[in-house]
Image: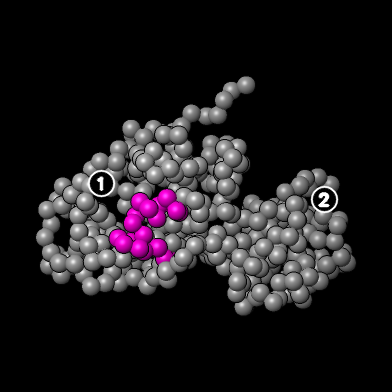
Amino acid sequence: MSGPPSPDFADDDYPAAPYPGRRPPGSFVHDDGGGWYVRAGRVGDTDLDDWLTARGAAPMADRVPLLCYGSNICPSKITWLRSALGLRGPAVLMRARCHDLAAVWASGLRVVDDQRPATLAALPGNTEDHALWFATLEQVEVLDVCEGRGERYRLGRVDTGEVRLTDGTLVDGPLAYTAAAPRRMPLLCDGRPVRCADVPQAGAAALTGVAADTDGLTVREVDVPLPEDFPGRVFVYGTLQPTASDWWRLEPHATGSRQARMPGTLYDTGLGYPGLLLGDGPGVEGWVVHLGEPARALAELDGYEGSEYRRVRVALPGGMWCWTYVWVNSTEGMRKLTAPWGGADPSRR
């Protein structure tokens, strides 16, 4: 038997010096000093969640989206996090386009090497490509130490601007480390912040100016981030829909709902409820339900859906991010449904 495919790149291809280091051109997973590109949710021919499972790692549903705009996108820096701070498990970094946001040079220098670090700032009209690190909570704890959470940077959900994955998925309110001290506030030169993309480190370290009073960001600080909060809504298409037989389970958690449609195929399981497979398909009608306490609601839904389903994040047309439950068993012999699920009576399907 052949072993797992070789990495697409090594750390040496993306050195960490000078700060912020070099970054791969696309989405990737990183482990053991090497990286594999992620394309259309797959690592080579393997589904990303299956790739993670094979490594004994947490699936995507148990990870939080953390916007990285500096050195944490660099593979060599990730290896340093492993050796110096004990980072464990594969790192999943998905390329993201950021609107009205910018990585800018901070007002202070790093103590360890006198290089100038990056910080995040609001910059209307600006567009930059960075990455979302889908991190386990254990990985967030390591990054907290690296970033000096509470001293140099704070961790919070950024509501300024717009962050989208390359497939158009809108990741609203992603986590990010933003300035918590004057020396991590944007450096103003002639009254304006300096984008990292415009000035390399050699020039940045020599810049002179003053620290901005604000980074212009709207940030909701968090204590312990919960994967279930990203996003705080679920797409339902069967018995959990409003007016359907088990809506009563979901209704107490709902703060709003609307009808929606997503790509995929719906099957009649023959058990009184439908099963969803993602993909192109004829499309599936359902409802987006916004959740007041997502972690509590999804824990109850996980128990209700059981082992026949897996909870995953999906994007609706237009990019809205939702949780939904996909069928994990065989669909052999099941009838495809071409109309919305309407309960046990076949005439209503």
Locate residue 188: give its quadrant: bottom left
Q: Which residues lie in the magenta part?
A: 140-157
Q: Nearer the viewer, residue 140 or 59?
A: 140
253 lies left or right of 338: left
188 lies left or right of 7: left
* Residue at the limit of the structure toward the top, as seen here: 1
Q: Is residue 282 visible?
A: no
Residue at position x 32%, y 48% from top?
Answer: 71
Amino acid type indicated by mark 1: Tyr
69 lies left or right of 325: left
Residue under numbered circle 2: 334
Residue at position x 70%, y 76% from top?
Answer: 251
Q: Position of residue 327 (x, y in %)?
A: 73, 52
The 10 Å Cα crowd at callout 2, few under 14, some 14 to 19, many 20 or more, is some
Callout 2 secondary element: loop
185 part of magenta stretch: no
Amino acid type indicated by mark 2: Met
149 part of magenta stretch: yes
Residue under numbered circle 1: 19
Callout 1 secondary element: loop
Residue at position x 35%, y 63% from top?
Answer: 150
Image quarter (top left, top right, bottom left or bottom right) of the N terminus: top right
Q: Position of residue 138 (x, y in %)?
A: 49, 51
Q: Position of residue 19 (x, y in %)?
A: 25, 46
Image quarter (top left, top right, bottom left or bottom right) of the C terminus: bottom right
- N-terminal of the two: label 2 or label 1? 1
Residue at position x 64%, y 67% from top?
Answer: 296
Between marks 2 and 1, how big is the CA–CA gap? 55 Å
Q: Is residue 216 visible?
A: yes
Q: Position of residue 247 (x, y in %)?
A: 75, 73
Locate residue 106: give its quadrant: bottom left
